Amino acid sequence: MQTLPTPPSGSVQIEDDRTGLSIETLKRAFLDNLFYIQGKFPALASKNDYYMALAYTVRDRLLRRWLNTAETYTNTQARTVCYLSAEFLMGPHLGNNLINLGIYDQINQAMTELGLDLNELLQQEEEPGLGNGGLGRLAACYLDSLATLEIPALGYGIRYEFGIFDQEIRDGWQVEITDKWLRYGNPWEIARPDWAVEVKYGGHTESFIDEHGNYRVRWVPFKVVKGLPYDTPILGYKVNTANTLRLWSAEATESFDFGAFNSGDYFGAVHQKSNSENISKVLYPNDEQYQGKVLRLEQQMFFVSCSLQDMIRILQMQNMSLEKFPEKFSVQLNDTHPAIAVAELMRLLMDEHGMQWDNAWNITTRTFGYTNHTLLPEALERWPLKLFSELLPRHIEIIYEINRRFLDDVRIKFPDDPGRLSRLSLIDESGEKYVRMANLACVGSSAINGVAALHSELVKQTVLKDFYDMYPEKFTNVTNGVTPRRFVVLSNPRMTSLITSKIGDNWIKHLDELRRIEQFADDPGFRYEFRQIKQAIKQDLANHIKSETDVEVDPSSLFDIQVKRIHEYKRQHLNALHIIHLYNRIKANPSAEITPRTFLFGGKAAPGYYMAKLIIKFINSIGEVVNRDPDVAGRLKVVFLKDYNVKFAQRVYPAADLSEQISTAGKEASGTGNMKFSMNGALTIGTLDGANVEIREEVGAENFFLFGLTTEEVAAKKAAGYRPIDYYESNNDLRQVIDRIASGFFSHGDTGLFRPLVDNLLHKDEYLLLADYQSYIDCQEQVSQAYRNWDHWTRMSILNTARMGKFSSDRSIRDYCQNIWKVQPVPIELKDYTQS
Ligand code: RUG
């Protein structure tokens, strides 16, 4: 690529095809990529070819920023955040890159002039669904904010060949389909085979004394797997910073040291070799029982070891000594999934780089921070000791030694407290033995944080209480946030334009500035426009629903939306009970005054989670009856939209009037969908759970529909021996709702289908739906009344958007940078690469 000298003024400017931004250049570059990369000319090209050609055109315009960024970080030896996460739920890249590059309008025009529809091409992208839900999407939002704030950062994870399954609904039931997202190639990534590394598994260890008389350990593995990095640029919003998401793919090693196997088992060795690729084959759907799934532990070890080795390579390439590791890198463990990093860094420093224990431990504990994302006991990872020791024989030795030293410290601080020792131990010895990953993360990290104020308090009082007693100074809170670039600017261009026309576009980077639209909340003209926009978006969604499900929904009805993973604690079935309550009211009196509502649900259930799958069937079954009952007369519609993913989420959040955030208090660590809805002007009906508490504080209690028990009340009720049947027996309305389900009314007369759901609610009800039922119904009645005064509703809606500044992921990342990572921005100067 040749750069032309600056032309004398008045002459024709010729732009480089890979960087130029004029419409003519963009069109030429696009056709060039179609021809030379896709190998097609327009008459033969498919929509996918057009998408790919456009993606390459955009990627070309990213590359200079990406390389400038890497060069600057190398030259300045910049302190770098490494975000270790088993999941990155990135969503489609194209639209986001257009927004962050600031070329959306130009590309739109270029495509129009070529007779193409940009929206159609955007829909063409197969999204990389390398995550389950909130945790993986949070990682993606954080990468966007890190780049936008010009913080040197690397995201490290796994390049799963199959991401989260695609969901189909057949006869009301969820059916899982494999997600072949790489089928047509991935234009956003670049393989970096030069930086491949090896990861060891199994075998045994041998100790020896080295030439300096030091005790050392050598690990003789049973199997070695190659990790190949694939890099994706992550561009910040209107800055030159483009950080890297580095995802590891497992491959067989080329050279195989059969000698190491010491067994002569040629066939077995080759079989192992061909099995290597399995490690990065598929993302585990959450809520599964991971325990005993050796592949899951292999995955964790795989990406952690690859990433730590990569950091050491970077350090050495920058001529920095290993002692500098904690100054060069701050490594964040996104949940316990990467917690094995504590033992692996120790191993690398000691066994591979000859460091002594104390030094290695000092480096390790200064390097890591750990984020806890759940209080649910079943989600706290622990590995059967036997499985762990067989797969990672060296790591278990290191963990035992960490534990021995740690428990000595505990004994000093808390003498004669055996109960505490056994709770704090890295090894659970209460029955079958387990390695406790959260304990390992806590001991090996210098900072531990929860993801919302309430959650961080509960972490200290419950699951990590003993660690809090031991190390109170390590604990802190960082409330989650979401990126307004993807979830407002890209998803809701109409609202973005309206806001920008009033207060300029500074808010996109400084979301607190949205407060300036509060002054328009009482302006009838602004309110009218705000409402018109919401209506237009609802109409679009109604059209989409019609084309997907053939159900007609009324865009002027209240759009009441619950989209998130399906889980009993999130209580989609409480929402369903409310629908049946309204239905019963209509059946009792068809002319009852009912505010028309459209209930929309979306979300995936873990394939092995029976109750969650039954809830999906339940919702669909209610819809089947309610949607066609003439007595309802269209006032209620119930739709379950299949295959909820990031692309679809972007369409849904802006269309909501009401956001359902109705988890049992104390169960949802934070929630992030709650933030995306509210930013787009939806009002929330919610419990005092997770980040709802802070959202309510920000938007004002009068602009939030609160119901339900508090965390303390939930605990007290359970302690007093909760009997859900008492609620059933004492509440007529609730009884009629439950009885209608039990009667087989929604299951073609089959009284058995929803029996497990009914029995569970009446006799167990772990998530206290019946205890919260009346409060929820009363609160929903307030919602219905409020929606009738749409002018006031719009005012509340504007105030929700205006007051969401706190929940930008930019604020979360600033908190992490200041309180945990201690890292500063490194602005990138855009220089012309072709001249150097
Ligand atoms: O369930 C939590 C959400 O409340 C939270 O908002 C999100 C991001 O912090 O993480 C979710 N989560 C928790 N996903 N997986 C876990 C447990 O591993």
Image: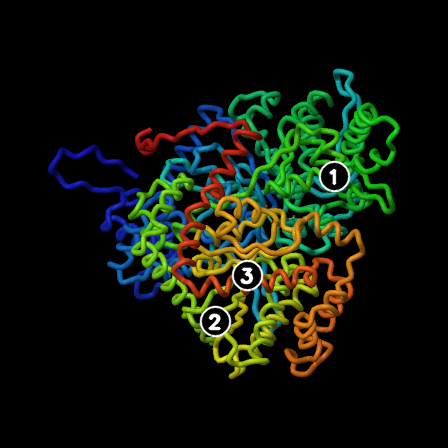
Asked whether residue 267 appears in the rendered view, the answer is no
Left or right, residue 78 beside residue 363: left
Q: Amino acid at mark 3?
A: Gln
Q: Please name the residue that numbered disc 3 is placed on.
A: 562
Q: Residue at x 35, y 30 (%)?
A: 829
Q: Earlier in the sequence, mark 2 or mark 3?
A: 3
Q: Earlier in the sequence, mark 2 or mark 1?
A: 1
Colour scheme in the image? rainbow
Give the crowd class for mark 1: few <14, some 14-19, many >=20 residues within 10 Å. Answer: some
> Is 650 left or right of 102, judged from the image as shown?
right
Q: Which residue is mark 1?
A: 221
Figure quadrant of the N terminus = top left
Q: Nearer the viewer, mark 1 or mark 3?
A: 3
Q: Are marks 1 and 3 in contact (CB under 8 Å)?
A: no
- Which three-letter amino acid code belongs to the residue tagged 2? Pro
Image-based side of 145 in relation to 526, left or right: right
